[in-house]
Image (cartoon, grey):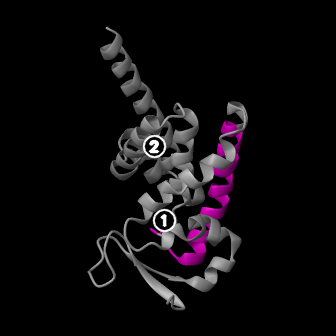
Amino acid sequence: MLRESIWIVSGKFLGEAPLVSVVKVEFGRMSDPAVALALSFGLGLVPWMPGTFGAAGAYLLYPLIMPLPWGLQCLLALLLLWLGCVACGRAARALGGDDPSVIVWDETVGMLITLVLVPATPLSWLMGFLAFRILDINKPWLIGTAERKLRGGVAIMADDALAGLAAAGVVWVILAILARLTTG
């Protein structure tokens, strides 16, 4: 049974000491549309690997926009990115912290960017997911710089948007290598 509130621990189970921080999230705050969106409508409340669950949320969103022309898919991804900048900044202030681990809309949109930019095949989607999570967790080069230099909702969203773009690039490079190896 769900209680009024739950302790979310970044990267740890409830009884263990936190690695980064402990964020108390009150379920009542989910009535705030900005918080609900920032938590990807509850995916951020998963106590174990919330970012991975947030990224997986893109697979629930993508079928809704997949039938649209590619240009419109890109436009919607940009719109959701902008909406995330606003909502995640507001939610971070409401929840207390710069980027609480329960805020996973950035992972959802970052992975959506990858899905929109790679071929619509299960192999591309799987490679994109793995590449996105590796890049999002390790934050190389510009991805980490964006997170460190920017502030508020823009900082929350920018590193994941860049990770989404980079993950799509990784997928295309791997597909090109595989094509060369299999046709050469």
Q: Which residue is identified by label 1?
A: 99
Q: Nearer the viewer, residue 160 or 167?
A: 167
Q: Is residue 166 visible?
A: no
Question: Residue at 49% across / 60% down in the picture?
Answer: 54
Q: Nearer the viewer, residue 148 or 167?
A: 167
Q: Label 1 sits on what residue type?
A: Asp
Element marked by disc 2: helix
- In the rendered view, does 114 fall on the left or right side of 20? right
Question: Residue at 60% across / 70% down in the picture?
Answer: 91
Q: Which residue is identified by label 2?
A: 163
Question: Residue at 65% across / 44% down in the picture?
Answer: 77
- In the rendered view, does 47 fall on the left or right side of 102? left
Mark 1 residue crowding within 10 angstroms, few (<14) / some (14–19) / many (20+) = many
Question: Residue at 72% across / 38% down in the picture?
Answer: 68
Say which mark, if any, is on residue 79: none
Element marked by disc 1: loop
Q: Nearer the viewer, residue 127 or 98?
A: 127
Q: Is residue 175 above or below residue 128?
A: above
Q: Position of residue 167 (x, y in %)?
A: 44, 38
Q: Is residue 107 above or below residue 18?
A: above
Q: Position of residue 82 (x, y in %)?
A: 67, 51
Q: What type of secondary structure mainly makes up the magenta span?
A: helix
Which of label 2 and label 1 is nearer to you? 2
86 magenta-colored: yes
Q: Which residues are magenta?
A: 73-101
Q: Label 2 sits on what residue type?
A: Ala
Tell me where residue 47 sits by quadrant: bottom left
Gap in Å between the C-alphas at discs 2 and 1? 16 Å
Q: Position of residue 67 (x, y in %)?
A: 69, 39
Mark 2 residue crowding within 10 angstroms, few (<14) / some (14–19) / many (20+) = many
Question: Mark 2 or mark 1: which comes first in sequence?
Answer: 1
